[in-house]
Structure formats: C-alpha cells, structure tokens
Image (spheres, grey):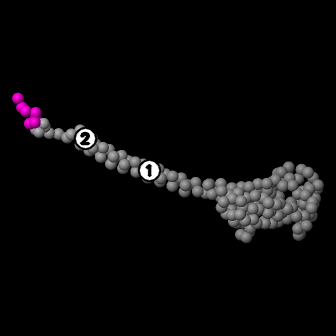
Amino acid sequence: MIPKKLSMKNRRGVSNIIGSLIVLAIVASVGSVILFQGLNQINAFNYDLTLFDEEHSAGLREDIIFEHIRFDPRSAPDGTDLELYLANVGSIDSTITAITVVKIDTQELIFSREIPPASEATILVEDHTKITITGANLPLGIDNIWDSTEYGPLNPANKYKITITTAKGSFFDKIAVPFNS
C-alpha cells in the first residue's frame, strides 16, 4: 500500500483554480479585441452617416419667415414691384437661390427669379433682409397692376403664393393678398 503523501506528490496536472484563470485570461483578451473592433466599426458607420446626411440636416436647421410683403403700385415704371422683408430665425445662414410668385386662382406665374443679387441672397442667422422683385410676367399695357382689378385688391380672389428656395434645398412659402394703403 502506498502512503497518501506519496500519491499526492506524484500526481501531475493543473489545478482547477489555475485552469480557470488561464481560460479567463484567454476569453477576456479575445473578447476585448472583438469588442473594440465592433465599437470601431459602429463609430465609422455613424461618421459615414453624418457626412452623407450633413446637407439634409443643415436644411432642417434653416428657417426663414416673411416679416412683410409689399405690393408696390407706385414703383417705377409700371407699378409691378414686389418687396419681400425676410428674417432668418434658423440656426444657420441661408442663401436664397430662387423666388417665384404664382397667382393662385389662375396658376399664372407672375415672377420667377433665379439667384437674387449677392447682397440680397444670403441672410445671416438672426438677421433680416429686403428683396425687391421687379419685372412681372404680365400682359403689356397694364399700368399699376397692384391697383388693377385683374391683379390688385379690388378682386378678393387675387391671392398670390410666394415661394423661396434656398441653396440647401429648403423652401418657404406664404400666401399674400395685395391691398391699398
């Protein structure tokens, strides 16, 4: 019979505690590599999304309001001027690229203007500007159109939709009615 002391001494192998520590070290190192690679891929994907959608999100931060619209029947030479007083209440600067005015009841295009002068085109944040539009697309021979029956305030059906388009693709519109002052 072999004494107990000798049998324990001759036994070879790794104890349960040491084995668990080795397995834990291997799992932790491989797991951390996988975790950090996954986090890096998620960050790269989010960065790509922000670059891809930056123009769209910038367009959402634009906001222009119409402070005042003036149909000027006394403007020279034919009384067709339209004055727009605009304010930028958004969180980024806005650049106007086009302005259109349509008579609602007849769908007649009154004004169509691409890219106003540079002094009028950009409205800074919390700033306002005045844009004067001249040269309406109207029949010849009508003087002071904003005082006339066909286009002026004497006919209650005379309503105009004014639309402003910005460089970021946003558009803002307002329905206006001329009136005598």
Whether 67 is drawn above or below 14: the answer is: below
Q: Nearer the viewer, mark 1 or mark 2?
A: 2
- Disc 1 is placed on an element classified as helix
**On the rendered structure, is 140 left or right of 16?**
right
1 and 2 marks in contact (CB < 8 Å): no
Which residue is under mark 2?
17
Residue 44 position within the rendered picture, expressed as x and y whole percent measured from the top left: 47, 54
For this orientation, the residue located farthest to the left is 1
How many marks can you see? Answer: 2
Q: Can you give x and y, in whole percent of width and height, for residue 61 in the image?
A: 65, 56
Secondary structure found at label 2: helix
Instruction: Mark yes or no: residue 31 visible.
Output: yes
* Lower position in the chain sequence, tag 1 or tag 2: 2
Q: Position of residue 92 (x, y in %)?
A: 65, 61
Of residue 39 and residue 20, the one placed in the foreground of this image is 20
For the record, the magenta segment spans: 1-7
> Disc 1 marks which residue?
39
The residue drawn where x is 47% and y is 50% is 42
Q: Nearer the viewer, residue 21 or 51?
A: 21
Residue at 21 percent across and 39 percent down: it is 15
Looking at the image, which residue is at 19% across and 40% down?
14
Amino acid identity at mark 2: Ile
